[in-house]
Image (tube, grey):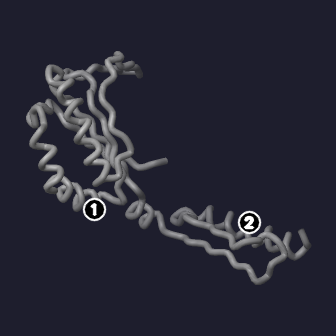
Amino acid sequence: MSDSGRKRNIALHNSVSALERIADYRLVTWTPASNVFWDAPSQSTSVTIVSSEQMRETAMIYEVRDYHYRTDLFDAYKRWAEEAVPVLKSKLDIVGFWVDSGIEPEVSGTDPMNPPLGQANITWIIRWESKVQRDERLPEVIASEEWQGVWAKHPDPDGYRQMLGRFMEEM
């Protein structure tokens, strides 16, 4: 690397390090053009900086849905889910959909407890661009003709003893 290329590399590295230290801002993307670290004066670098507030507003969220479904109808539910899950996946950004395997859960910690209903026997995760997108999109999917057709085949729509939805962000 030439001396001028080395100086440009050091200057760019120092600039990026300085940006990363600013508490209220985060470096989101840093896309060097080809050969930017080499002796290529015509090349440029693109840097996007957004505030922490903007990051919270635009960060993906994950909705983790845990259901306690009637154990006496669980096999019927799993058969129904074989048709329902592909429809959901075609309409939503489903990370995964899981049903209880029958293996006993492992509960630990400094104050472990087993909930009165036991552990959830259905868990699924949906990725959303934002809570706003979720609040707009989910009712549309539920109201869709295709989903209503699948829902009409449900073994017991009232069989959910408890449903829990949590909103998580990726670390």
x 23%, y 36%: residue: 81
Query: Which residue has dot 1 on it?
Result: 132
Where, by quadrant of the figure, is residue 33 drawn? bottom right
x 34%, y 43%: residue: 125
Looking at the image, the residue that sits furthest to the bottom is 42
Number of numbered callouts drawn: 2
**Relative to 59, does residue 31 appear above or below in the rendering?**
below
Where, by quadrant of the figure, is residue 1 drawn? bottom right
Where, by quadrant of the figure, is residue 123 drawn? top left
Alpha-carbon neighbours of circle 2 within 10 Å: few (<14), some, or many (≥20)? few
Q: Which mark is residue 13?
A: 2
Going from the N terminus, do you reach mark 2 or mark 1 first?
2
Alpha-carbon neighbours of circle 1 within 10 Å: few (<14), some, or many (≥20)? few
Residue 133 percent coordinates (x, y): 29, 61
Could you give the CA–CA distance between mark 2 and mark 1, rounded to whole angstroms? 37 Å
Secondary structure beneath disc 1? helix
Dot 1 amino acid type: Val
x 91%, y 73%: residue: 3
Secondary structure beneath disc 2? helix
**Relative to 42, does residue 49 appear above or below in the rendering?**
above
Q: Is residue 45 left or right of residue 66?
A: right
**Relative to 112, does residue 22 appear above or below in the rendering?**
below
Dot 2 amino acid type: His
Q: Is residue 51 left or right of residue 2?
A: left
